[in-house]
Amino acid sequence: MKPLLILLILLSGAVFFFRSTLFGQGITTSLAFNPYNNYPVYQGTDLRVTYSKTGTTLKIWSPPSQEMKLKLYKTSTGNDMTEEIMCRKDADGVWKAELKGDRKNTYYTFQAKINGKWYDENPDPYAKAVGVNGRRGQIIDLNETNPSGWANDKAPVLNNATDVILYELHVRDLSISANSGIKNRGKFLGFTESGTKNNQGQSTGVDHIAELGVTHVHLLPSYDFSSVDESRLNVPQFNWGYDPQNYNTPEGSYSTDPEDGKVRILEYKKMVQALHQKGLRVVMDVVYNHTGYTHNSNLDQLVPGYYYRQWEKDGKYSNASGCGNETASDRAMMRKFIIESVIYWVKEYHIDGFRFDLMAIHDMETMNQVAEALHAIDPSIIIYGEGWTAGDSPLPEQYRALKRNAKKMNGVAVFSDDIRDGIKGSVFDDKSTGFASGAKDMAESVKFGIVAAGEHPQIDYSKVNSSREPYTKNPAEVINYVSCHDNNTLYDKLKISRPDASEEDLVRMHKLSNTIVLTSQGIPFLHAGVEMKRTKGGEHNSFNKPDSVNRINWDWKYENRELVAYYKDLIAFRKAHPAFRMQTNEMVQKNLVFLQTNDPQLIAYQLKDHANQDDWQQILVVFNGSGLDKNVVLPKGRWKAALQNYQFKDYQDTKSDTTRIAPYSAMVLYQE
Ligand code: CA
């Protein structure tokens, strides 16, 4: 054997050893400061309640505990403890309790004694069922939480990730308005109601979403969060829910009975089943990056400090979430917790995708392992997240799941704030405008979005608003959007930034904005209600505002029926044309060519040669972001318009070699 070869083998062995020790195979070495390196890692996948009719086993991980109590209760809040059991210490920091007989529906808490101090009672972080306000876990038989037909529940077929069209929705907003015509207002069960109508007789709820033609409903937090008091549901309360309490159980306030942990599970599954039956897939917004409570969270009460990052200089909890803490995905047991949690939601609840809040708080290795684990179960599961943090983190930038590191992740997409702000102006400055609202310096940012934030010879990256280089390898790695639950709605932003514009022009800008999104390469994302000109009255941070600000008002659907119809046509148009859904950057580079318009308010590009096997040989897309009519010189050949002045129609052949495009509008022409 040659010395070089021996050296290579030794080196690859060293790399393997480094990887396997760093990433969860025995010790807790992590990527950021970690004072808990001496804690053992538990490799088993049974940290949970394992129920059977003859006995129940409960296991919890807490290396620093000197003692661990398990307390059993009759009800979810009452002063009715029936038993107190001292758990037995097991290997690798695990504590275990074995209960004989059928303990179904019993409530429980754990209590840890650390450094001589008894901490608060809490359910285990892995709890799959909890009572009201998530303060006690519940031993249940999960088989009893399956709706009829659950074994045959299947998500609609999805061929390619670029076929996805996301619709971001808050559970309560969909149905809380009386004019939704929905009985189970504000509940998971609201999604199971079909045939519901507004006062004008138009469809509402899931029927509306299905008719719109989107493929995925992305739900704002639907796991158990702490900000809504589940014991006072007669009082209207609203919160987005970015304050996780129990990650592996649904939120109680969206159920019809938060006391009984089984009810919310059954009703959540009924929601997923109903959406699947309507041809819609379901994405969960997950917030593993921080918890609602810090020192009072079940994570911190059972293993103080371990699940959160600290600053090395003073040991204080860091706060990259801006919400008081940040979790430590780079520590083995937190990473394991995240991975097992998403797998659980897929297997138990048939979830089809995950949106990671402030994903850059997580390390890339965790995100890659999440994607690998989920895609091993089902390659059509989509995973995407916000490639940024809300504050500084002890996790060095090189490890963060940042937008600019997206190329180093596989099967994980990131939101494009470049196209978002390029189209409508910065979210940090209400008054700023974007390409669709008349800005003269945003065309390059929009073009960067059109090519799905990838490598393209015609993009001048130095002119893109917030990126200096491509960050995707392929189009499915970027989420294109112009508005979401955060910040002003699209309509409010346009109105605030263009107080001079007529209502008619605002609607044109509105249409132009999402026409750009829905014709761009990548995965398009719509904020629920945008198709009916959703407004929050200029409220840019509505996380805890009343229903009157947040709810979907189903009268809007009638008032803006022409806009709703346009969105429907636009979505159908994207679905009919694979040219807008290319799967590789190579295809985009080969088939998408920008025309020189010599006008910063005019973008034109061609999709060539039956791109992605499109029926049309050539497609020409033109966007006019100015308030004036513009002339466009057409490339050679006889062109036919498919979209003009926001009307999809069969138009006559264009005889001339130029065409006019109306102010703030989009045009699509083609050659068969
Ligand atoms: Ca809750």
Image (tube, rainbow, N blue to C red):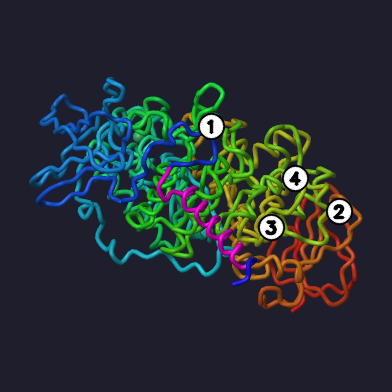
Q: Are marks 2 and 4 in contact (CB under 8 Å)?
A: no
Residue matched to label 1: 542
Query: Number of labelled discs?
Result: 4
Relative to residue 193, is residue 451 drawn left or right?
right
Can I make out residue 628 in this image?
A: yes
Q: Is tag 3's residue or tag 1's residue first in the polypeptide sequence?
A: 3
For ligand 1, give the image quadrant: top left
Residue matched to label 2: 629
**Region in magenta:** 5-27
- Rate crowding at label 1 as few (under 14), some (14 to 19) or many (20 or more) other CA atoms within 10 Å: some
Of circles 3 and 1, the one toward us is: 3
Residue matched to label 3: 452
Image coordinates for residue 658, horizontal then vertical, percent: 89, 67
| Amino acid at dot 1 | Ser
Inter-mark Cα distance, 1 to 2:
37 Å
Q: Are marks 3 and 1 in contact (CB under 8 Å)?
A: no
Of circles 3 and 4, the one toward us is: 3
Residue matched to label 4: 505
Of circles 4 and 1, the one toward us is: 1
